[in-house]
Amino acid sequence: MTERIYSTDQYAATVAATIVDVDEVDGRVLLDRTVFYPGGGGQPPDAGELVIGDDRLSVVRVGSDSRGVWHWLEGGLPPVGTSVRGEVDWERRYRLMRTHTAMHALCGVVWDRFRSPVTGGNMEPGIGRLDFELPDWDPEARDPLEDELNRQLAAARAVEISFLPRAEADEDPSLIRTKVSLLPPSLREVRVVDIVGLDRQADGGTHVASTSEVGHVRIAKIESKGKGFRRIRLALEETVTG
Ligand SMILES: [Zn+2]
């Protein structure tokens, strides 16, 4: 199993690791530990490089399975046992962390105002979309929602990561709202991302440590997605950079 450094140390951009398996057919290697997020929960996988001596191999894709985190490489594959340094494209990853935290903050603000659960979402660096069950949407509510979201971000709320035993997570009302029940039953421990006082949900993704790091965000668009559903698109103001 790969030690998933990004799960507990979200600010680790590089790590020394060893190749523990090579899949010549798919062109990928398995590492004993990694800082590369393999994708999931709407957050795309990281990009970056594996450095071996003077060689830099591009990681063109990352994914995970029951064995751990696989790194797809361009060109020939190094043999099992090779020492590497994994380096994520930090500028891209940090922008994803800010985007991901902004999206959870939006979940919290929408829940506080409308008691509307989120039903799905996706993001790219700097932009995200979330779908909500929002039956009675008033277009006049857009600006106040954006203002409230930015107030909450500017309040520099701590974003804390914890791990809960599954049985405890299954009985936590705030986690049930974000559909912890949909997690695979085999999962014994649930990772929880808590924007303290605003939003708490089961999530495997990478986040900034304080909402102040997100900076200012815009609600770019609110679209109707069928009866009772709204898609909210948000964008980071790129005045703040990682
Ligand atoms: Zn999330």
Image: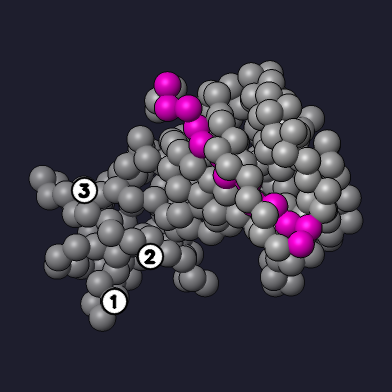
Residue 222 left/right relative to 241: right
Residue pictured at 19% horizontal, 63% vertical: 74
SS at circle 3: strand
Residue type at tag 1: Asp
Residue type at tag 3: Val
Picture coordinates of residue 35, whole percent (x, y): 41, 47
Q: Are marks 2 and 1 in contact (CB under 8 Å)?
A: yes
- Bounds of the magenta segment: 227-239
From the image, tell me which residue sits under label 3.
51
Residue pictured at 53% horizontal, 23% vertical: 215
Residue 170 left/right relative to 55: right
From the image, tell me which residue sits under label 2.
70
Picture coordinates of residue 157, whole percent (x, y): 68, 24
Is residue 169 visible to the viewer in this orientation of the structure?
A: no
Q: Quadrant of residue 76?
A: bottom left
Mark before the other along the chain sequence, 3 or 1: 1
